[in-house]
Image (cartoon, helix red, strand yellow):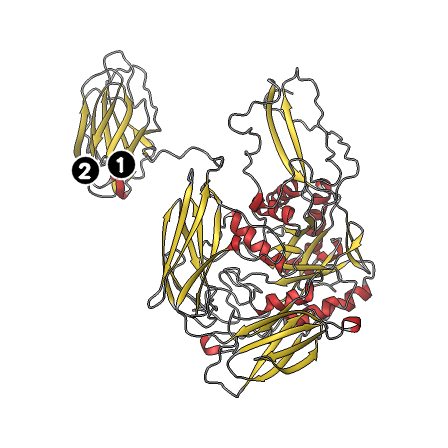
Amino acid sequence: MAALATQTATLELAVPRPQLWSVSDPRLYKVEAVLRGAAAAPAREPARPPEGRTPEGAARRLSNEPARPPEGRTPEGATRRLSNELDRAELHTGFRTIRFDAERGFFLNGQPLKLHGVCIHQDHAGVGVAVPAAIWEFRLRRLKEMGVNAIRFAHNAVAPEVMDLTDRLGLLVMNENRNFSASAEVTAQLEWLVRRDRNRPSVMLWSIFNEEPLQSTEQGLEMARRLVASIKRLDPTRPVTAGMHDGLFAERNAAQALDVVGINYQIWAYDRYHREHPGRPLLSSEDTSAFMTRGAWASDPQAQVLAGYDEEPSSWGATHRESWKQIAKRPFLAGAFVWSGIDYHGEPTPFEWPSASTFFGAIDLTGAPKAAFHVRRAHWVKDRTVVKVLPHWNWAGREGRPVKVMVASNAPRVRLLLNGQAVGEQDVDPIDMVSFQVPYAPGKLEAVALGSGAQAGRELGRDGVETTGEPVRLVLIPDRAMPDLTGAAGRAALAGDGRDAIAVVVSAVDAQGRAVPTANLPVRFEVAGAGRLIGVGNGDPNSHESSKAPERSLFNGLAQVILQSRRDSQGTLTLRASAPGLQGAELVLPVQQAAPVAAVPVAEAITRVDGWRISAPQAERPDPNQVLAGNDMNSWGWGTPPIRQTPEAGPWRAYRANLKLRADRNDGRGRLVFREIVGQAEVWADGVKLGEKTAFEASPLTVPIVAGSGWRTLTVLVRAQAGQPSGLTGRVFAEVGSP
């Protein structure tokens, strides 16, 4: 292959009896591509792992995975396998089959699988959209705990590190294009996305748009046809969908170009579309849009707070229970994508300012579960008993008055106990759950999940809430030490690579160590050692507290701190929390040395001076204060150093540039550096002479920058030695001076 040319090589690798990737057992294989010089002999490596074992090099859960070198690089100190190896790259992939059936929904590896999906944006409390990969892992694991098996990244391509996680954690992905257009630019963006992710086992669908105005028109159909064709040229193995909230029954509409029709909301359209288009696979590409505030159990529109009993649907959506009821009972619907899995900044519907984030999520901005999390978990988790009592049991002042108690459970029947005495027992509706009205009395409220049939009356599990005392002590719990409902193991230490991060839950407990769910008190934080605090949050949509300050109030009992290791660090990272009148808390996390993350060198902290005007050669010394008209584009020339003039009849030239100084270069200690000047030189700024160079020979020059205006006009007069070249032959920049 010629230098700078490109070529495509097609190779076939035999993989006998591949272990299949699935949402419950996401087996991955590593594929390496090696570029060798022309004299290299072909080398083959085994692709089949030992039976019953994970393929060698396959990725494990992120929390257990050792650092890997960047693509195309070998670990420091390692030698390449052959001396003529030029480069290498690797990717992880998996083997699985997918199929959408117009009557029976979605199939993975030949088995029916109802999609328990959520739509999520890309931001998190405390860090905005700059979410470390470890915090993404925390978010996705929390969704897995809820029973989620599919993610719709709404509405754009996410970072490849996030896609790595969906592969490793076993989450199917609707991979969505941001713009709906058949222009060359947008098509190129879509093709880039397909090329990037087409080898990922988690990707099951490409989505070409969401709720676009042209979806119900012939123009929309033609654009959809072209985008689908572009995808199929690159990936004929996956179907294409889109999120349509209108136009499904128009004579010409974008759905007619799709492999799988995505319906946003429009519950009324499910049966009609299936009836009129019996051969078209369908899924709910977006649904629900119900509101709730974590830890709130009474709606107060004036305070912009919404109760968590799943009774606050949007005008266009439905409650979590009603939405899933309509999807679960229709086998032809492949599944659901709930709006939204996690709260996000902005869009505070149904309110406006001062609310600053959404109420849609089943999980709040910090990743803490709302009531919807537990309801969905009861709907979706099938391999273990789910039972959760809602709400808390701190209702001082309401003694004897009824409190609505909701139990989210996948058990057939639930018995409710208050202080050990039965106060109710009911069959559980698998969708609507079960509710009781219980006169409040302090103590312990428990829900006991009971079996049915041959297991009638047998206890399958229980959950309880207790009346607590006042908070007396703070507690810090790191995410990886928390019980993980998926059974995933934690990790012993943070990697000291400057990237690894961890979410820490902050709460307050009473004298008996019970978390106080009504605590709303300010907490301050101090961090020392091999890491730093990069964000705080508490899940309150109405909070305007800083996301970066070392303090945050608990909101309905909880707050969160996000810590990150420092680059090239090891040892310990210590977090301390304090609150007025409470015993503080301290958390010490080990930080272990880790391979450095591949990165470009730190840029030199300089301010370059470019865009110079250059006078014609002159016999006499020019006036450094000469005024050049702003619209004069021709009397003086243009250039950027290095500028070298050939020997000329007139020895003098003037060079002029405008310079904007940063504060750290305009404090009287900054310096103006000329890497090289050929000829004698005088340096002026706004009529003030800064320095001069008396020798004709090429040499550097540094002059001080006097504190003053942030904008300066620089003039450099250069005098050539007779018959010799001259000019600003090196780079020119302003730099920070010594303290």
Would residue 381 be found to the left or right of residue 653 on screen?
Answer: right
* For residue 233, side relative to residue 616 (left or right): right
Viewer-closest of 427 and 283: 427
Secondary element under disc 2, as helix, strand or loop, is loop
Q: Is residue 401 above or below residue 698?
A: below
Residue visible at 56% across and 61% down in the picture:
342
Question: Residue 635: in sight, yes or no?
Answer: no
Q: In this figure, which residue is indicated by the disc labeled 1? A: 736
How far from the left and from the top, in percent, is residue 348? 50, 67
Q: Is residue 702 left or right of residue 432?
A: left
The alpha-carbon separation of the residues under discs 1 and 2 comes to 12 Å
Q: Nearer the N terminus, badge 1 or badge 2?
A: 2
Q: Residue at x 76, y 74 (%)?
A: 456
Q: Nearer the viewer, residue 148 or 419?
A: 419
**Crowdedness of circle 1 by 10 Å Cα count: few (<14), some, many (20+)?**
many
Q: Nearer the viewer, mark 1 or mark 2?
A: 1
Q: Position of residue 483 (x, y in %)?
A: 56, 58
Quadrant occupied by the N terminus? top right
Horizontal relation, residue 490 to residue 111: left or right = left
In this view of the protein, which residue sits in the foreground, 64 or 260? 64
Image coordinates of residue 599 in percent, x first then y, are 47, 35
What is the x, y in percent for residue 432?
68, 74
Q: Quadrant of residue 83?
A: top right
Quadrant the C terminus occupies:
top left
Amino acid marked by disc 1: Val
CB within 8 Å, label 1 to label 2? no
For this orientation, the residue located farthest to the left is: 688
Q: Is residue 574 above or below residue 350?
A: above
The residue to which callout 2 is attached is: 706
